[in-house]
């Protein structure tokens, strides 16, 4: 059974090293939960991404509470969420006090010029590493492609995409059974 | 009283924003700048810039900063502003976390049911598309610089390819890759 301190530190790391919003957390979470701690399979990880996206609220916090709950129930969820938001909240509080010094800092800006392309690459890689777990094949590759294009080019909300996929799955399960 | 208003406002923001941080930002702007006038539009723009540059989910960052600034602008001392930021950050996650816990409990019980399994199979395919769209959406001049033969674009492309290949093989930790890319940026652009 996962220890509370493992859950806390894992989410503390994820929360601390996420730059530019929730999806940038995916590669780090994948490494922590699937590869390192073996808390879940890659399939289960993908399920959590879909469901966290379909729920209201902050994606990363939803992922944290779902993972914490899976490992140690309600208390596990509380520990995971606390670990996940501790560093961001402290950081923003410090910034609110010393705001200008940080924003106009040329060193910070240079670091971020290097970080931004890395964050894009970190989000792009799981598309390929997780395609196997999602059982992407030539027969069904049109589904992820269509989803990506609808969101990227047409501006369709990812929430609608998740709901549509769930509906499609439900209809298929009716035909199968 | 401003603390109750903060709690209630961010409780609703948390409950009614679907699709992650950026859709939340629009709602927060409407509530905080237009309706309650807890901060000016300029302060809100600053806040967005900071949220991009600090670790953590954008939704949490925005709630924390908005809570702090609102209480400070209402004329309270700094320690009260810190309380305000904590209240806003907690309020924004209460309802979503409750819903997620209920859903998780249901799912852990029923995940092996054949119907649920089929739905999950489709969801996984869609999620691959969702993540791809997030990466594509970030391939902008803001992330990479203007395409062409210039230092910024060249360095960005090299960093992208290196980080992409290393994380495809799952050898390097994302934390190490992030720290290294930041260091490369600092060194290259300081020369």
Image: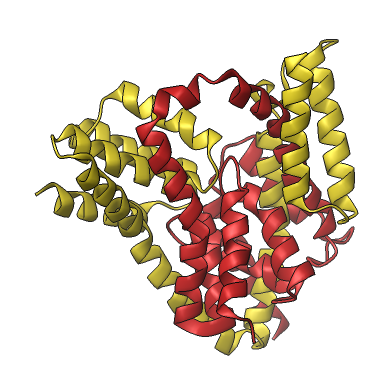
Chain colours: A red, B yellow
Residue B79 image offset from top left, x and y in percent: 23, 46
Q: What residue is shown at x 40% (from left), y 64% (from top)?
A: B96
Query: Where is B39 relative to A159, above or below?
Result: above
Residue A89 image offset from top left, x and y in percent: 43, 49
Furthest-top residue in this view: B149
Please indicate whether residue B5 sits to the left or right of residue B97 in the image: left
Residue B16 image offset from top left, x and y in percent: 35, 54
Please indicate whether residue B38 sits to the left or right of residue A104 in the image: left
Query: Where is B110 relative to A23, above or below?
Result: below
Q: What residue is shown at x 88% (from left), y 55% (from top)?
A: B171
Please indicate whether residue B52 sits to the left or right of residue A132 in the image: left
Query: Where is A27 relative to B64, above or below?
Result: below
Q: Quadrant of the C terminus of chain B?
A: top right
Question: Can residue B185 be seen here?
Answer: yes
* Picture quadrant of residue B62: top left
Query: Where is B87 relative to A149, above or below?
Result: below
In depth, the one of B19 and B168 nearer the eye is B168
Residue B55 image offset from top left, x and y in percent: 55, 44
Q: What residue is shown at x 82% (from left), y 12% (from top)?
A: B148
Q: How many marks?
A: 0
* Picture quadrant of residue A19: top right
* Picture quadrant of residue A75: bottom left
Question: Can residue B147 be seen here?
Answer: no
């Amino acid at each position: 059974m996962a220890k509370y301190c493992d859950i806390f530190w894992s989410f503390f790391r994820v929360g601390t090293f996420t730059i530019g919003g929730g999806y940038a957390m995916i590669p780090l979470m994948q490494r922590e939960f699937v590869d390192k701690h073996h808390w879940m399979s890659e399939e289960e990880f993908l399920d959590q991404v879909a469901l966290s996206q379909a729920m209201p609220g902050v994606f990363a916090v939803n992922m944290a509470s779902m993972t914490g709950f899976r490992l140690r129930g309600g208390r596990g969820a509380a520990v995971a969420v606390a670990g996940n938001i501790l560093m961001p909240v402290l950081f923003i509080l410090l910034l609110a006090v010393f705001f200008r010094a940080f924003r106009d800092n040329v060193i910070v800006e240079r670091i971020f010029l290097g970080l931004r392309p890395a964050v894009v690459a970190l989000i792009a890689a799981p598309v390929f590493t997780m395609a196997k777990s999602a059982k992407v094949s030539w027969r069904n590759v049109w589904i992820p492609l269509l989803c990506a294009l609808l969101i990227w080019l047409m501006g369709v909300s990812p929430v609608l995409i998740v709901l549509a996929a769930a509906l499609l799955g439900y209809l298929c399960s009716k035909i199968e059974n | 009283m401003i603390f109750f208003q903060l709690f209630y406002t961010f409780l609703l923001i948390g409950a009614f924003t679907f699709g992650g941080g950026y859709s939340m930002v629009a709602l927060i702007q409407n509530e905080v700048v237009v309706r309650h006038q807890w901060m000016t539009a300029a302060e809100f723009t600053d806040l967005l810039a900071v949220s991009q540059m600090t670790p953590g989910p954008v939704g949490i960052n925005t709630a924390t900063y908005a809570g702090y600034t609102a209480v400070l602008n209402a004329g309270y001392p700094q320690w009260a502003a810190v309380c305000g930021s904590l209240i806003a950050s907690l309020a924004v996650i209460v309802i979503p976390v409750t819903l997620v816990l209920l859903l998780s409990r249901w799912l852990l019980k029923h995940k092996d049911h054949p119907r649920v399994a089929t739905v999950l199979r489709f969801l996984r395919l869609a999620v691959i598309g969702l993540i791809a769209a997030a990466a594509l959406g970030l391939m902008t001049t803001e992330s990479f610089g203007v395409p062409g033969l210039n230092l910024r674009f060249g360095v960005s492309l090299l960093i992208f390819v290196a980080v992409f290949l290393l994380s495809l093989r799952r050898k390097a930790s994302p934390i190490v890759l992030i720290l290294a890319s930041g260091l490369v940026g600092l060194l290259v652009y300081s020369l």
